[in-house]
Image: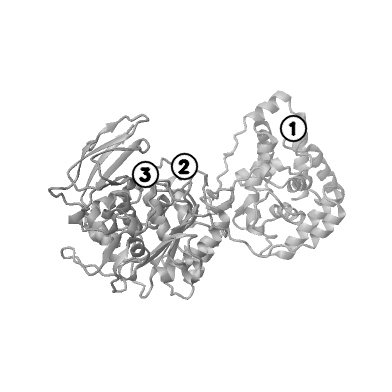
Amino acid sequence: MRLDRWLFALAFALFLSGMARDQFDIWIDATTLPPLATETAREVRDRDGQLLRAYTVADGRWRLAVSPGEVDARYLRMLIAYEDKRFYHHAGIDPRAVLRAVVAGLSRGRITSGASTLTMQVARLLEEGSTGELRGKLRQARVALALERRLDKTEILALYLNRAPFGGNIEGLRAATLTWFGKEPRRLTPAESALLVALPQSPETRRPDRHAPAARTARDRVLSRMQAAGVIDADTATAATRDPVPTRRRPFPALAPHLSDRLIAADPAAQRHDTTLHRATQIAFERMARAALAGRGDRLSIAIVAADHTTGEILAHVGSADYDNDKRQGFVDMTRALRSPGSTLKPLVYGLAFDQGLAHPDTLIQDVPMRFGTYAPQNFDGLFRGTVRMRDALQLSLNLPVVQLTEALGPARLMGALRSAGVEAVVPGGRAGLAVSLGGVGVSLEGLVQLFAGLAQGGVRIDLSALPQPQTRPRFLSPEAAWHVGHILSGIRPPDGGSEGAIAWKTGTSYGYRDVWAIGWDGRHVIGVWMGRADGTPVPGAFGAAVAAPVLFQAFQRIAPRRTPLPAPPPGTLMSGTANLPAPLMQFRSRQAALSPVQDAPQIAFPPDGARMALGNGPLVVKLRKGKPPFTILADGAPLALAASEREIRLAAPGPGFVILSVIDADGNSARAAIRLE
């Protein structure tokens, strides 16, 4: 600034001092201020408040909201001491600084110090005005005086911290600390603080990534001044000068990009989205996803969802391994894409069969060639095992047994259970057939993980969400049936010879090797992995057990190296080998034998279907007609009576709520009644 402009500044200060007080007040109060609201980036944060992803503001600048209370106290002391040491005492203009600058300029013939206060700098930043024009200086002074009347010092300081330039498209202290140091501004070293004090004075000529020597010189000048002012001691200043200056810009966090985009689109007005994700877990899973695709071609994609099934909170969400990779179509969120689930719905089919009293884990079933009308399913390996136990059929993921169970249950019941679990399922043509249990339906990875979370929680619906929300938890499967399924799946041998029993898990491969899956849970976490191509083309030779399962077990190791054990069986669980099962449960019978009405099939005479009964503390009385004793009576799949020979039976009533009573006679014929106990 030329000497004549400092003389103008002096004249302006004298003018203000000579104005009548009331005229001065009128002049300042009439000031039209620029907009004070600062547009800052929309942010997505994790469960601990750590930044996952931020978005630039409308003009492409990085500007992240920060308040003085979120900033290192030493940086604030250095800023005030260097820029405006009487900031907390002047009214917007510091007359002493003006006089000092003018006197020094007149005596030396050149400018040796400035007189611009932090409030005046804020005025310039708000209006993006010039620092050199006389009219601009007058305007900045007037706006500064008006700002001091309408805002407190903390609010003015906050405007500076959010608006100050730090090189390129970086504005505001928080954007600067993330760019140059990869950290939040709450904890800064003396060297970092000094550089951040120096940068706004000349943000382009001191950019450390382009002009590192100039940045270092400016930083060290600040350190020297701070030592002289007593803000830091000599040892601290000397040590800080030895710290290197950053020589590159760090990228802003872009974690969970698909989920972040979804949250922003769902609520674009929200400035901050606080999620249930865990940042360290998210970073580990994204790295793991990229490693899983290494050497597998440039079109393969992967998606992973991990959640706490006790709360429904999503802890990690990977929509693809590479958001910006067009060859992989990385922009497609494959956690939401509807794909064929392969064999991953089989656990639900078995659970429904256990629940309905059609089978027990040790019930025998035939794995032999069969036709169901024109439908003749085959096992994945083309082999047949003959007579097998239900638990073995599920662990081996055999197709013929599960299709028999689906026929006995009816595909509509399976679809209804999926809806009850909160899973979106789309059937080609709109009508479900027997192939639904083998993957003939479209579901998403998020949907499958939600289903398995419900199984892990004993058959109640668990709504997964990345935002904290209450759970209503309606039931879609009995606790006993859900436990049986988990117990069976925990017996599947893990990849690489790991120990059995820690994780209940299932794999799946869709028709044509288009999708491979691995989903599992322990006592707390549920994780799902999908791999395939986003465009739905086949991946020859890929199947879940070999490709997705290792990723699943790596994910469990990263989310919690020490497993939370699976739960113990509920009190009503029938634990028995095949030989000790009730006769109707020893061998699975066809749909016609098990479900079709026959002349002598048992009937539940009381309570009638649809009855509402107030029992108090009394027993549940069941009256039977027809059928061949002995009878087995179940409530929601749990046995209430075994080998009962009487036709009027007094039973210990289950808890209040809706109950499905089932009776099976010695010939395997059955009857059911849905009642409500109060």
Q: Which mark is residue 475?
A: 3
- Dot 1: element: helix
Residue 327 visible in the current orientation:
no
Between marks 3 and 2 in the image, the one whose residue lies nearer the viewer: 3
Residue 383 visible in the current orientation:
yes
- Judge whether 8 appears above or below 428 on screen: above
* Residue at image mark 1: 16
Q: Crowding at label 2, few (<14), some or many (≥20) Cα neighbours within 10 Å?
A: few
> Amino acid type of disc 1?
Leu
- Judge whether 42 appears above or below 19 on screen: below
Which of the pair 102/364 is nearer the observer? 364
Marks 2 and 3: in contact by CB < 8 Å? no
**Marked residue nearer the N-terminal end (3 or 1):** 1
The answer to whether residue 140 is left or right of residue 495 is right
Residue farthest front in this picture:
645
Residue 74 in the image: state x and y as whole percent: 76, 47
* Residue at image mark 2: 469
Quadrant in the rendering for residue 675: top left
Residue 660 in the image: state x and y as whole percent: 29, 42
Q: Crowding at label 1, few (<14), some or many (≥20) Cα neighbours within 10 Å?
A: few
> Amino acid type of disc 3?
Arg
Q: Which mark is residue 534?
A: none
Quadrant in the rendering for residue 532: bottom left
- Dot 2: element: loop
Residue farthest left in this picture:
599
- Judge whether 631 appears above or below 438 on screen: above
Q: Residue at x 65, y 64 (%)?
A: 248
Q: Residue at x 67, y 47 (%)?
A: 133
Q: Crowding at label 3, few (<14), some or many (≥20) Cα neighbours within 10 Å?
A: some
Which of the pair 190/396 is nearer the observer? 396
Marks 3 and 1, Cα distance to the nearest angstrom?
76 Å
- Dot 3: element: loop
